[in-house]
Image: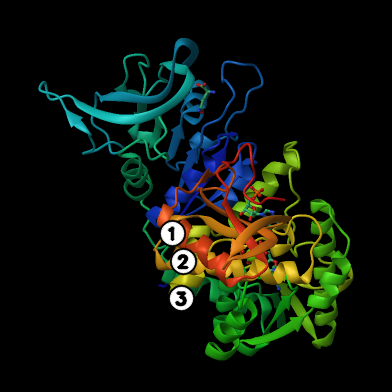
Amino acid sequence: MTRNIHDHRILILDFGSQYTQLIARRVREIGVYCEIRPFDATPEEVREYAPSGIILAGGPESVTEMGSPRAPAGLFELGVPVLGICYGMQTMAEELGGRVAGSDKREFGYAQVRVTAESDLLHGISDHVTDAGERLLDVWMSHGDQVVETPEGFEVLAATDSAPVAAMQNPSHRLYGVQFHPEVTHTLQGQRILSQFVLDICGCEALWTPAEIVEDAIQQIRDKVGSDKVLLGLSGGVDSSVTAALLHRAIGDQLTCVFVDNGLLRLNEGKQVMDMFARNMGVNVIHHNAEDRFLSRLEGVQDPEEKRRLIGNTFIEVFDEEAATITDVDWLAQGTIYPDVVESAQSRSGKATVIKSHHNVGGLPETMKLKLVEPLRELFKDEVRKIGLELGLPYDMVYRHPFPGPGLGVRILGEVRKNYADMLREADAIFLEELHRYDWYHHTSQAFAVFLPVKSVGVVGDARRYEYVIALRAVETLDFMTARWAHLPYELLETVSSRIINEIPGISRVTYDVSSKPPATIEWE
Ligand SMILES: Nc1ncnc2c1ncn2[C@@H]1O[C@H](COP(=O)(O)OP(=O)(O)OP(=O)(O)O)[C@@H](O)[C@H]1O
Ligand SMILES: O=c1[nH]c(=O)c2[nH+]cn([C@@H]3O[C@H](COP(=O)(O)O)[C@@H](O)[C@H]3O)c2[nH]1
Ligand SMILES: NC(=O)CC[C@H](N)C(=O)O
Ligand SMILES: [Mg+2]
């Protein structure tokens, strides 16, 4: 019998914690497939998903309040192992007849947990053993409420000085709870605890490996599109490149990619995409030069949001025209990844303010009437990168910094002009080249040059120079929501600055951006 990587799967129910996605990533790292669903998923949905185990995540609410969220009806009677984390443990306790109470001993941050009983969940795990033989764990806590009475059939597994129930279990029903957060790295043995739940208690096999994911995705693509033709917008970025490689492996010549040169790309981007995909891999790639069209649309436009809108619309126009020239295309492929899916579901319910509109080619006109194929829809970025390597894409392509859709359009402040774009491209290329040479590229999350259309005086070879300014930007971040400016070595900055001023006649001065996000954003516009 062939084993399917989806046979063993964990269901994570989201009660609104910031860490729910992190739990999912940890489970995937263990090698087991999982999905996140809202806490109010129906019991049918849960049964249909057929989980091998369920994790109830944390949440901001208090189970002591009327009307606070509860697990789907019948969840604890499914016979499937359940692990409650923080709010998840509290609701488990409450629903099964235990008691939860608010406490004035709130625990936020580091805590030390004493393991008081043996269990499959914490088996063999400790950070310190005291002289008296007590096992201690270093964990991370974030709670105000606590379980004060466990439900019938449960025993306490661990405690802290302020929380009498830091972990509990009912082994015959395979129900477990932890008050601390095993998903964060501050809980030193967190990954081991999750892995003992997922592998030992739920009995999952670690089948979710890059090779298996690729194998499975290829089969799914073939089943879905059959002998139809597929169109993909290929940007040279990570997501669309991995999508291209995967589709090409699955359906070969049925795939056509369109690469649009909007005149706002990095130096040699078009050539790199054509070399890599068209020449090396034999993918059908149409190179569409639309520089004039984009730049003429942008003439005289100063406002960043207006520029984004114009670039987005022109993109759609070009793409639409290109699609019309390829006969009988039935499918449009997109590089949508799992965080896009989760975040758009979350933002539908929230009221987040728009700081910048992050467009992509997602909103294509309905008149295109193409069906959608999104082979990366279930994957996190780190998984996308791993399968990119598995598919044979070079490391530097798979681990390149993200590049925004509007490209240099939002890195030239105010009006976009061709000569500005040309100077910026050169400056950016020098910066990236030196970052690689000094081995700093992969120690920054994003690095680029920005063109400032203001003039400054300089002196080059005894002559006066009155020219433009380049700002360098490099940041370190995990999620791009917050970022710290990268502390690049002075020698590196010095080399880059002197190369830019010497090699680009239109630039007289280079500055380094030392703003963090917040309050600044990563891009200047
Ligand atoms: N120059 C381009 N030509 C064709 N399609 C493009 C271009 N730029 C963007 N796209 C399309 O828009 C999508 C979204 O762009 P986005 O920058 O978010 O992702 P990406 O370029 O694939 O990856 P990364 O986030 O690493 O840059 C891409 O997946 C691609 O399909
Ligand atoms: O596809 C995109 N279209 C956009 O309009 C856009 N604006 C910013 N970014 C990228 O988003 C991340 C956060 O950037 P900010 O701190 O500037 O908002 C960084 O990685 C930015 O490069 C964009 N990506
Ligand atoms: N992080 C959590 O899940 C917190 C649960 C609950 N809101 C408490 O304060 O105890
Ligand atoms: Mg991109």
Name the residue nearer the viewer: 410 or 107.
410
Is residue 26 shown to the viewer in this render? yes
For the residue labelled by badge 3, is the local secondary structure a helix, a strand or a loop?
loop
- Residue 203 in the image: above or below residue 392: above
| Residue 360 against residue 200 in the figure, above or below | below
Query: Residue at coordinates 49% horizontally, 12% vertically from top-left?
Result: 101
Q: CA distance from mark 2 to mark 3?
A: 20 Å
Q: Residues within 10 Å of mark 1 (few under 14, many from 20)?
A: some
- What's the amino acid at mark 3? Pro
Residue 348 x/y as whole percent: 74, 43
**Residue for badge 1:** 492
Going by the image, does 419 lie left or right of 139? right
Where is residue 373 drawn, in percent x and y? 68, 70
Q: Which residue is mark 3?
A: 394
Instruction: State which mark lies toward you, 3 or 1.
Output: 1
Q: CA distance from mark 3 to mark 1?
A: 25 Å
Name the residue nearer the viewer: 475 or 160. Answer: 475
Report the disc number at residue 9.
none
Q: Amino acid at mark 1?
A: Leu
Residue count near mark 3 (Cα–Cα under 10 Å), binned few <14, some 14–19, many ≥20 = few
Q: Is residue 508 left or right of residue 295?
A: left
- The image quarter in which residue 279 lies: bottom right
**Closer to us: mark 2 or mark 3?**
2
Q: Find the distance from the CA under tag 1 to the CA under tag 2.
A: 7 Å
Q: Read off the residue under disc 2.
A: 434
